[in-house]
Amino acid sequence: MNVTLNHYLVVSVLLFCLGLFGVLARRNVLVIYMSLELMLNAANLALVAFSRFNNNLNGQVMVFFIITVAAAEVAVGLSLIVALYRKRQTAHVEDLTSLKL
């Protein structure tokens, strides 16, 4: 069985929908953050698939830069989640306003 572009795109869409569901349905900040990362990886999968089937490396280079920026995003995002947890001893979305000065 040959794996086509449609197979990759279906997996990408399913991962993106799963991440979107996690963002919309959950109240825990850490789960929401992981769902956002899942959505980002779904977009990366689609970019790599398009790049592979078009025999062009532009999509793969773009994914490399996206992963680099995502690593910095993880550091900042997790530090905000840790700050929220230290202040309120909870990681629920409703407590995000407690970080105001």
Image (cartoon, helix red, strand yellow):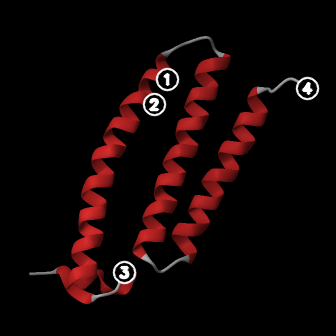
SS category of the residue bearing label 2: helix
Residue located at (64% from left, 57% from top) = 17
68 left or right of 27 in image: left
Mark 1 and mark 4: Cα distance apart in space:
25 Å
Mark 4 and mark 3: Cα distance apart in space:
45 Å
Question: Disc 4 marks which residue?
Answer: 1
Give the mark nearer the N terminus: 3 vs 1.
Answer: 1
Where does residue 42 sit, x and y in percent of width and height? 58, 45
Q: Nearer the viewer, mark 2 or mark 3?
A: 3
Give, as a three-letter code, the residue at label 2: Val
Give, as a three-letter code, the residue at label 3: Ala
Residue located at (47% from left, 80% from top) = 27
Give, as a three-letter code, the residue at label 4: Met
Give the mark nearer the N terminus: 1 vs 4.
Answer: 4
Mark 2 and mark 3: Cα distance apart in space:
30 Å
Q: Are marks 2 and 3 in contact (CB under 8 Å)?
A: no
Question: Disc 1 marks which residue?
Answer: 60
Question: Disc 3 marks which residue?
Answer: 91
Q: Residues within 10 Å of mark 4 (few under 14, many from 20)?
A: few
Where does residue 13 sit, x and y in percent of width and height? 67, 47
Residue located at (25% from left, 68% from top) = 80
Mark 3 and mark 1: Cα distance apart in space:
35 Å
Q: Are marks 1 and 2 in contact (CB under 8 Å)?
A: yes
Residue located at (57% from left, 59% from top) = 19
Where does residue 26 sit, x and y in percent of width and height? 53, 77
Question: Disc 2 marks which residue?
Answer: 63
Quadrant (top left, top right, bottom left, bottom right) of the C terminus: bottom left
